[in-house]
């Protein structure tokens, strides 16, 4: 008697579970951060603020995938009659489908774990050296915002390993370390020199900041990082369009350093552009959002649906009760800038900030 070769119910069942899995996967992928507690750390009793590692959304999806893959492989090797080519090929098709999803999910899982590790790194170090940190000039004055070679060497010698530097472009397109002048220093293209016009690279390289300090380029910092494997760079590029340009330059010239670079973005729309260039670690800085017209929904959506290292904002915003409470509710690490005295450092750490930008480089002056 011929066996009925009608509808392959096993195949339909497996295919149906595949679509169920996709629904579960996308649910966790788009779940708000409240559902992303790290399973391992959460089971160890750590609170939700700390439990960032091994996020639930990818761990759960990966686990579900593996279970169904085992089921499929069992059917493939024990139940499939190779004479029935349709059944054999259909089972192979679904198996490959699951393998692809598992690999993709596992890669997401590894990325999330890496981000969790960087959050831990900042939490343990507490301080990100701001624009190279304080440095003393030849005439004995203590200055900041220099982004100079001397400040880099001084900060590293003092034990600073997380350093932020400002990047700008010369008129001939070279990426240099320079913080544009503020209203108080309106005559400066960069702190340390009374020049208002954008310089060429040759002009910039011949400057002496505050009369004695040496200016740097992005290449200088990259070469320093290659020689000092424990240094991490936090980028600060004030113009949104230039953030991508700086990251693209790093991607093309220093791809080996990307895993030690944390990119600050100043608009939510920049996130995907930077991710596509292969940068995992992103801090969403609220520097450019006006306080009086601030839209919490933009930050909330970005914080809860994107894989951020954290959110950074000023001490002024941190002192605003409504603003601070909203940031806390997003359950993402918070960093504050710029904090230079011990009492304030303690205050912000007690408030729940997991790191801060500071000009201070001497360990005795840090809380």
Image (cartoon, helix red, strand yellow):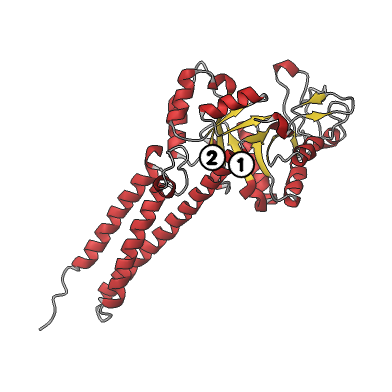
Left or right, residue 71 beside residue 192: left
Is 228 drawn above or below residue 243 in the view shown? below
Residue hosting label 1: 262
Is 216 drawn above or below residue 293 in the view shown? below
Residue hosting label 2: 309
Residue 245 visible in rendering: yes
Is 129 drawn above or below residue 256 in the view shown? above
Please name the residue shown 34% across and 66% down the image.
Answer: 95
Quadrant of the image containing the N terminus? bottom left
Please name the residue shown 36% across and 52% down the image.
Answer: 60
Please name the residue shown 77% across and 30% down the image.
Answer: 146
Element at badge 1? Answer: strand
- Between 12 and 171, the one lying in front of the other is 12
Quadrant of the image containing the C terminus? top right
- Between 213 and 43, the one lying in front of the other is 43
Q: Earlier in the sequence, mark 2 or mark 1?
A: 1
- Image coords of residue 13 (percent x, y): 22, 62
CA distance separating discs 2 and 1: 8 Å
């Amino acid at each position: 008697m011929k066996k009925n070769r009608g509808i392959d119910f096993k195949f339909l069942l497996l295919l149906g579970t595949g679509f169920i899995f996709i629904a579960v996967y996308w649910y966790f992928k788009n779940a708000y951060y409240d559902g992303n507690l790290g399973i391992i750390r959460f089971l160890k009793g750590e609170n939700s603020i700390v439990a960032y590692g091994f996020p639930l959304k990818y761990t759960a999806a990966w686990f579900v995938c593996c279970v169904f893959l085992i089921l499929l492989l069992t059917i493939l090797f024990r139940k499939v009659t190779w004479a029935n080519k349709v059944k054999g090929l259909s089972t192979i098709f679904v198996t490959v489908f699951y393998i692809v999803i598992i690999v993709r999910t596992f890669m997401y899982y590894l990325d999330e774990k890496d981000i969790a590790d960087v959050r831990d790194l900042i939490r343990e170090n507490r301080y990100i050296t701001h624009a190279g940190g304080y440095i003393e000039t030849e005439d004995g004055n203590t200055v900041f915002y220099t982004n100079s070679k001397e400040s880099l060497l001084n900060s590293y010698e003092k034990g600073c390993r997380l350093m932020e530097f400002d990047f700008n472009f010369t008129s001939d397109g070279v990426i240099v370390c320079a913080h544009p002048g503020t209203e108080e220093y309106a005559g400066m293209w960069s702190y340390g020199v009374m020049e208002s016009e954008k310089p060429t690279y040759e002009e910039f390289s011949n400057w002496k900041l505050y009369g004695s300090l040496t200016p740097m380029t992005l290449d200088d910092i990259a070469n320093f990082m290659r020689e000092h494997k424990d240094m991490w760079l936090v980028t600060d590029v004030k113009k949104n369009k230039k953030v991508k340009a700086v990251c693209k330059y790093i991607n093309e010239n220093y791809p080996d350093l990307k895993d030690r670079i944390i990119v600050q973005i100043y608009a939510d729309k920049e996130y995907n552009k930077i991710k596509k260039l292969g940068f995992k670690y992103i801090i969403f800085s609220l520097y450019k959002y006006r306080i009086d017209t601030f839209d919490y929904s933009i930050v909330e959506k970005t914080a809860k649906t994107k894989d951020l290292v954290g959110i950074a904002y000023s001490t002024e915003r941190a002192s605003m009760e409504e603003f601070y409470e909203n940031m806390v509710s997003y359950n993402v690490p918070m960093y504050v800038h710029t904090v230079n005295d011990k009492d304030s450092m303690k205050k912000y750490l007690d408030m729940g900030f997991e790191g801060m930008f500071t000009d201070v480089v001497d360990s005795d002056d840090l809380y």
